Image (tube, rainbow, N blue to C red):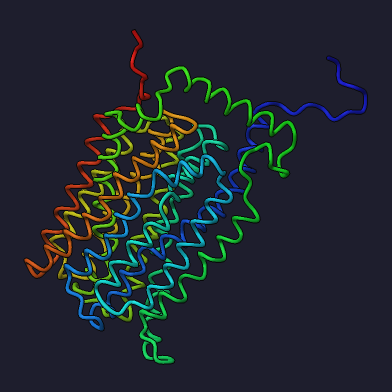
């Protein structure tokens, strides 16, 4: 049909694609990343609080490791139900609910008086946060075509190292409030660092939209391009789409869960102990937060580059393998530098860059396989299995520290976990989960 005189010329399709993806990225990723940043601060600030809390409350390394990791048991148990509810009610309301409830629970950590209360509140924090990360991954399948997802997931997941890079110095400063108004420094830490979660939770409820059709900030041609592109992807996935039960019991989905277990085993095995590792290496409590920031600031840059390069080349598995190899080398080296502050920081930096580089690329594998309720359930299951590594890693670090008196054996264990994650990714491939043939 001829264009009417005086009407605006039609925009080229590639221009619509570029503009739409730029708008989606700027509209969604900063808010979601702020939410994840706040969640991660509330999740790992216990590692800084432990510098005082363990002494004040008489926690052993084993007690601390168990309490730090038990969050992931609550997370794993409630993650699949949480994501299925998100599929029903929409991302805006459910993600906001998650943020608000975990913020309240994280603030209540200031009330801990003993080991039992520590265990209960850390477990409840995992229950409250369950479903946020896989919920965001699933939410993005409604907004971002698969070919562009690794880069945006990478930008979202940069919140992990950035939360530690920011939270380290802030946590150290809050610990220096020790004794103010009768509260310990670690109590001030929990109270102040819960505020961002509450603010972002309210902002999510106001600001987020569930689908492109509700986005008043996209033009009609942009909505049409995005809706048609995502619909075509879902139609392609539907040709080999398994049922929810088939996906949840699929060997490939369970192996992906094991792959993520090994990655989280290495990630949290170090992350929830790194202030104490560096303190053991000779860095004073007043400055340990600033030194912790260095490895994770480098990891933030590494995550962005690794995911960008994976999207650029369209290759996934070997990027995961290379990141896992770097993570293994760094963490294994850190096991033999625990008495040198400088070498310990350098080794942990390599370990953090490699370990965190795995994550955004890994999540492109299951997201490319499934759609709809099946994707919501399978993503949550993979994350649930994986996050059990978040319990096992910190606990074994604490147990080996109690048994041996230092961090050497624990660091070697988590290094092997990261390497195993890369080997599993190499074996599992990038092919979709297939529905069994019907007779």
Q: Is residue 157 above or below residue 381?
A: below
Q: Is residue 217 left or right of residue 181?
A: right
Q: Is residue 411 above or below residue 15?
A: below
Q: Residue furthest left?
A: 404
Q: Is residue 306 above or below residue 347?
A: above
Expressed as whole percent of the image width and height from the top left, the position of residue 162 reads: 43, 60
Q: Which residue lies at the image location 25% right of the left edge and 47% below the top edge?
A: 326
Q: Quadrant of residue 173?
A: bottom left
Q: Is residue 235 left or right of residue 183?
A: right
Query: How many numbered markers are drawn?
Result: 0
Q: Is residue 23 left or right of residue 384?
A: right
Expressed as whole percent of the image width and height from the top left, the position of residue 371 reads: 47, 30
Q: Is residue 325 left or right of residue 253?
A: left
Q: Residue furthest right?
A: 5
Q: Which residue lies at the image location 44% right of the left edge and 72% below the top edge?
A: 107
Instruction: Compare residues 182 and 363 and report the one nearer the observer.
Output: 182
Instruction: Compare residues 85 and 136 and report the one nearer the observer.
Output: 85
Q: Which residue lies at the image location 13% right of the left edge and 66% below the top edge?
A: 401
Q: Is the N terminus in the top left, top right, bottom left or bottom right quadrant? A: top right
Instruction: Compare residues 67 and 159 and report the one nearer the observer.
Output: 67
Expressed as whole percent of the image width and height from the top left, the position of residue 328 reads: 21, 48
Q: Is the C terminus in the top left, top right, bottom left or bottom right quadrant? A: top left
Expressed as whole percent of the image width and height from the top left, the position of residue 373 reads: 47, 33
Q: Which residue lies at the image location 27% right of the left edge and 60% below the top edge?
A: 70
């Amino acid at each position: 049909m001829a264009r009417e005189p005086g009407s605006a010329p039609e925009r080229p399709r590639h221009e619509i694609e570029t503009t739409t993806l730029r708008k989606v990225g700027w509209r969604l990723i900063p808010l979601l990343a702020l939410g994840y940043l706040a969640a991660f601060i509330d999740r790992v600030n216990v590692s800084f609080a432990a510098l005082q809390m363990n002494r004040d409350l008489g926690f052993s390394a084993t007690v601390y490791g168990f309490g730090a990791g038990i969050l992931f048991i609550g997370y794993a148990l409630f993650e699949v139900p949480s994501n299925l509810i998100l599929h029903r009610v929409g991302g805006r309301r459910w993600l906001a609910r998650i943020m608000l409830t975990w913020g309240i629970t994280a603030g209540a950590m200031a009330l801990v008086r003993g080991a039992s209360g520590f265990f209960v509140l850390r477990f409840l924090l995992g229950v409250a946060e369950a479903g946020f990360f896989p919920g965001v991954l699933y939410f993005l399948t409604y907004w971002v075509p698969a070919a562009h997802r690794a880069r945006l997931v990478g930008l979202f997941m940069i919140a992990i190292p950035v939360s530690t890079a920011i939270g380290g110095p802030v946590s150290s400063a809050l610990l220096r409030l020790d004794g103010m108004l009768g509260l310990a420094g670690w109590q001030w830490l929990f109270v102040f660092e819960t505020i961002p979660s509450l603010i972002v939770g309210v902002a999510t409820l106001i600001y987020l939209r569930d689908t492109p059709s509700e986005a008043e900030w996209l033009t009609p041609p942009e909505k049409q391009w995005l809706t048609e592109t995502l619909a075509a992807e879902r139609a392609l996935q539907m040709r080999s789409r398994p049922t929810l039960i088939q996906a949840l019991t699929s060997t490939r989905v369970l192996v992906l869960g094991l792959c993520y277990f090994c990655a989280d085993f290495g990630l949290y095995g170090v992350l929830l102990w790194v202030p104490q590792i560096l303190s053991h290496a000779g860095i004073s409590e007043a400055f340990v937060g600033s030194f912790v920031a260095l490895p994770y600031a480098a990891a933030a840059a590494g995550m962005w580059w690794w995911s960008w390069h994976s999207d650029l080349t369209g290759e996934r598995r070997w990027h995961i393998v290379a990141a896992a190899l770097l993570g293994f080398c760094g963490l294994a080296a850190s096991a033999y530098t625990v008495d040198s502050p400088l070498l310990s920081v350098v080794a942990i930096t390599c370990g953090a860059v490699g370990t965190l580089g795995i994550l955004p690329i890994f999540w492109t594998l299951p997201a490319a396989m499934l759609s709809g309720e099946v994707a919501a359930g399978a993503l949550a299951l993979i994350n649930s299995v994986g996050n059990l590594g978040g319990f096992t890693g910190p606990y074994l670090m604490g147990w080996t520290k109690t048994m041996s008196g230092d961090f050497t054996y624990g660091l070697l264990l988590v290094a092997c976990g990261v390497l195993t994650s890369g080997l599993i990714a190499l074996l599992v491939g990038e092919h979709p989960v297939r529905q069994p043939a019907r007779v």
